[in-house]
Amino acid sequence: MGASRVWQALGLHASLQMTHYAWHPARIVIVGAGHVGATLAYSLVLDGLAPEIVLIDQDQRRAEGEAMDLNHAVPFSTQCRVWAGGFEDCAGAAVVVLTAGAGQKPGETRLDLAARNGAIFADVVPRITAVSREAILLVATNPVDVLTYAAWKLSRLPPHRVIGSGTILDTARFRHLLSRHFGVDARSVHAYIIGEHGDSEVPVWSLANIAGMRLPDFRAAHDLGPDQAAMDGIVDDTRRAAYHIIERKGATYFGVAAGLLRILEAIVRNQATVLSVSSLVPSHYRMDDVCLSLPTVVTCNGIERVLHLPLNDAEAEAFRHSGDVVREAIGRLNLPSPSGADG
Ligand code: NAD
């Protein structure tokens, strides 16, 4: 089978067939130059992915200070320009990353942030789309699924151009803990957390595998007995990781910045990478009008395709519950009516 037939069989766009692995210079704008935004900008400088990085923050002096500091890392990396800008700089951006907003305080859930950060999005998103309707919006602000949905509604962009970082971080935490338990590189663990980036998130145990072997088979092949307590502990530690970190250092930012960088790489380099990111859940999951994470093919188009997972009954039920939790939080925001959105 020729390469283009393979791409067609995978159902990928013609544009992707033509441009796969092509590299396009890209301006990345980061709205919110706090812990997450500044750490992402630093990762971008070291990675060399973007020749132009713009920081926008309501605290202009903070954005300026971060930009000055970041520019002093450039001589040790790949040439790029970093500056503290305004919303007019979103014109010509490939991606605008939204990290503006309050983070959790010790004991707070992500959903507790919805009203405060929803109000920030109601201000910021129209200012972005007033100057750019080409940029992909990448949302990291919490509660990320609720705000991905809000960004879609407020922007009136087609749903495939609005992405939430979703459970990319939870999936990384899950793989890290599984890799330690099974003694293999986390990159060799294929396991996903789906649903809400939050307390109702769902581990997909039925499809988790190492070297193509489901975990019970991997255990049996390596003379490891069943260990339900350890697996329950891994889920709990994955779900509670942010709480544990925030209790100790006040915020989390390295993991999410690495996850955002990975999403940006998939977009800018058009890689068709499968990542657990948040977007409007497609109809085959029978879950109307909500954004949640699922393994998703990410390309220069944004959300190229959300994969249809063969979940078992318990996982499907837990995923539906996660959708109910997020939909209820969305309902509490005063968003434009469904007819106001394109696509
Ligand atoms: P932070 O307080 O360090 O930074 C937030 C920045 O947003 C501040 O610099 C603030 O001035 C700016 N800001 C606020 N309102 C603004 C506006 N209207 N316009 C422009 N800038 C504005 O917070 P942080 O630790 O960087 O966290 C940012 C967000 O990311 C939080 O909501 C946090 O919960 C979330 N987060 C998400 C993940 C994830 O996995 N998605 C992980 C960690 C943190």
Image: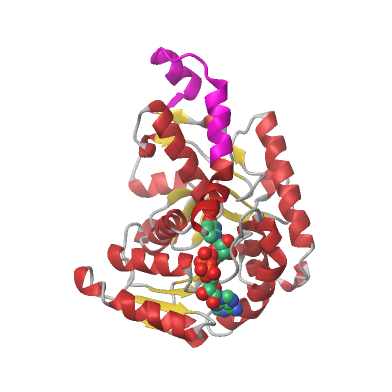
| Span of residues in magenta | 211-237
Q: Residue furthest left?
A: 76
Name the dominant secondary structure of the magenta segment.
Answer: helix
Tell me which residue sits at (48%, 51%) in the image: 297
The percent position of residue 14, horizontal first and vertical second, equals 44, 58
What residue is at 50 percent from the left and 52 percent from the top? Answer: 248
Q: Which residue is at a point 64% across and 73% down the rendered structure image?
A: 121
Q: Nearer the viewer, residue 198 or 161?
A: 198
- Is 336 left or right of 261, judged from the image as shown? right
In the image, residue 130 lies in the stretch drawn in magenta: no
Tell me if I can see residue 82 in this picture. no
298, above or below 114, in the image: above
Whether 29 is drawn above or below 87: the answer is above
Up-down: is 22 above or below 235?
A: below
Quadrant position of residue 139: bottom right
Q: Is residue 212 magenta?
A: yes
Tell me the quarter of the image containing the N terminus. top left
